Image (cartoon, rainbow, N blue to C red):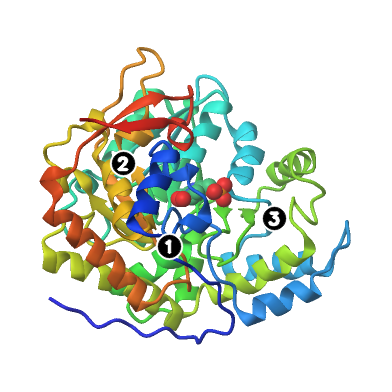
Amino acid sequence: MAIKYIPEPFRIKMVEPIKMLTLEEREQRIKEANYNLFSLRGEDVYIDLLTDSGTNAMSDKQWAGVMIGDEAYAGGRSYFKLVEAGQEIFGYEYIQPVHQGRAAEKVLFGLLMGPGKYSISNMHFDTTRAHVEIAGARAIDCVVEEAGDPTLRTPFKGNMDVEKLERLINEYGKENVALVVMTITNNSAGGQPVSIQNMRDVSAICKKYGIKLNIDAARYAENAYFIKQREEEFKDASIKDIIKEMFSYADMFTMSAKKDTIVNMGGLFGIKNDKELFQKAKGNTISFEGFTTYGGLSGRDLEALAIGLYEGLDEDYLRYRIGQMEYLAARLDDAGIAYQSPVGGHGVFVDAKAMFPHIPYNEFPGQALAIELYKEAGIRTCDIGSYMLGNDPDTGEQLHADFEFTRLAIPRRVYTQAHIDIMADALIAIKERASEVKGYRITWEPPVLRHFQASLEPLK
Ligand code: F0G
C-alpha cells in the first residue's frame, strides 16, 4: 500500500554537493576499504545512512545562535540558556552539558555502580553497556519478547519486560541492582518506542525496591511522538506534556544530544533532585569534560543545543520525520522486503537474514547487505547483527546475534523524497539478485568493538 510522503516543513537555504561514483569506482573503493564501511571516505559515499547521530542539518536559527554563543570559560550566557531550556522541558532541577552521550555515562555510572552490581535495561546501547562494564558492573537486557520477531506489528516493541525485571531484581538481590535504564526509543531493537504505561510500571518497581531509574534519552522526542500516535490516553496531549510526563517517572537521564536535539555535537545529563549525586557528578564533569559551565563544548555548541531542544519537539517536524520512515517502510512492504516492523523512529532496520536465508550468521548477512547497498547505489549503512556483536570474551567463539539487521539510519532534515526512493529502489534491486550474494569472512580483527576496524573478504 503506497502512502503519501509528508512534505518537508522547511525549505533549503544552504546546500552541500554529493556525488555518486561509478559502479567500478564503488567496487574498487569498498575493496580498498577491506569491505569495512567505516573505512570508506565520506566523499566516496552518495547517501550516508551510517548513523543519525551528529549528522543532522541545523536550522537558520541554530546557525544564528552559533554566532552569538558566549565563549566565557565560566558562567557564559549560552550555558544558562541551555540549563533553563533543560529545566523547563524535562522538569529536572539539575541539568549538565557534556560533549556527547557516552560522556554523560562515563561521568555518572562510576558513581552509581561497581563490581558485583547490575544495570538492567530494556536494552543497553553499546556505549552504555561499555560504561556499565568499565564501572565493573554487568549490563542485563530485559526487552519484551515481541521485540525479537521483526514481523510482529505491535505498538511498543521497545518496552521493558516488567515481570522479568522484577524476577531479575529478586534473583540478583535488590541491593545489587544499582540502576535501571530505560532507553527511549529503544535503538538496539530498531528505534522502537516505550509507552508511558511501561514507564509507570517500571517506575513503580524501582520505587518498591529503592532502585534509581535512568532514562537514556537520545531519541526522547521521537518516542513522545509515537506515544501521541499509539497510546490512547495521550492522543490529545502536546509533545511537551508527554515528555514532562515521561521524565517525571525517572530520577535522572543521560542524553546524546546528537540525535533528537538536532545538533552535530553535544550531550546532557539531568538529575531530578538528588543534590548530593549532582555535586559528585559535577566533580567528575570537571575532571573528564571541563568546567561545568561548558562541559566539553564550545559556547556556540551550547547555544545551538538550547535552540535545538525546542526545535526537536515541533509536531510538524516530527510528523514529517516519522513520515519519512513510514514512507520508506511502505515501499519495502510493497516489495516484500522484511524489516523490524512497525518501522522505528530513526531508521529502517532491514532483516538481512530474511533477504539472504542462504548466508549463515557467521558469514554476516547484515554486513553483506550493507556492502551490496554501497555497491548498488553508493549508500552507506551498518550491520546490527553478529558482525557487530563480535566474539565471546571467554571462549573467543563468534556470538550468534538475535537479529541480523542492516540499519538505514536517517539523518534529520537532510535527505528528500527522491533520496528515500533511491534507498527503496536499491533494496529492491538487491532483493532481485539476493541468491547470488555471498557471505564474508573476517581476515583481521581487533579485540574490542571490532566492527569499526576489522578487515573482511568475500567468500567464494
Ligand atoms: N544511547 C543511545 C540510545 C545511543 O543511540 C547512543 C549513540 C548513545 C547512547 C551514545 O551517544 O554517540 O553521543 O556518545 N548512538 C549512535 C548510533 C552512535 O549510531 O546509534 P554518543
* Residue type of the residue flagged with mark 1: Tyr
For the residues marked 3 and 2, what is the alpha-carbon distance in whole angstroms?
A: 35 Å
* Residue type of the residue flagged with mark 3: Pro
Instruction: Pinpoint residue 177: horizontal percent, then vertical percent.
Output: 47, 30
Question: Tag 3, which secondary structure?
Answer: strand
Q: Is residue 210 visible?
A: no
Q: Earlier in the sequence, mark 1 or mark 2?
A: 1
Question: Tag 1, which secondary structure?
Answer: loop
Quarter occupied by the C terminus: top left
The residue sitting at 71% across, 42% down in the picture is 281
The residue sitting at 88% across, 56% down in the picture is 73
Depth check: 319 or 324 in front? 324
Q: Earlier in the sequence, mark 1 or mark 3?
A: 1
The residue sitting at 83% across, 68% down in the picture is 70
Instruction: Pinpoint residue 425: horizontal percent, then vertical percent.
Output: 23, 66
| Residue situated furthest front in the rendering | 24
Can you tell which of label 3 and label 2 is closer to the viewer? 2
Residue marked by disc 2? 367
Q: Residues within 10 Å of mark 3 (few under 14, many from 20)?
A: many
In the picture, measured across the screen, residue 2 lies left or right of residue 174, that is left
CB-based contact (under 8 Å), mark 1 and mark 2: no
Residue marked by disc 3? 97
The residue sitting at 33% across, 83% down in the picture is 6
Residue marked by disc 1? 46
* Residue type of the residue flagged with mark 2: Gln
For the residues marked 1 and 2, what is the alpha-carbon distance in whole angstroms?
A: 18 Å
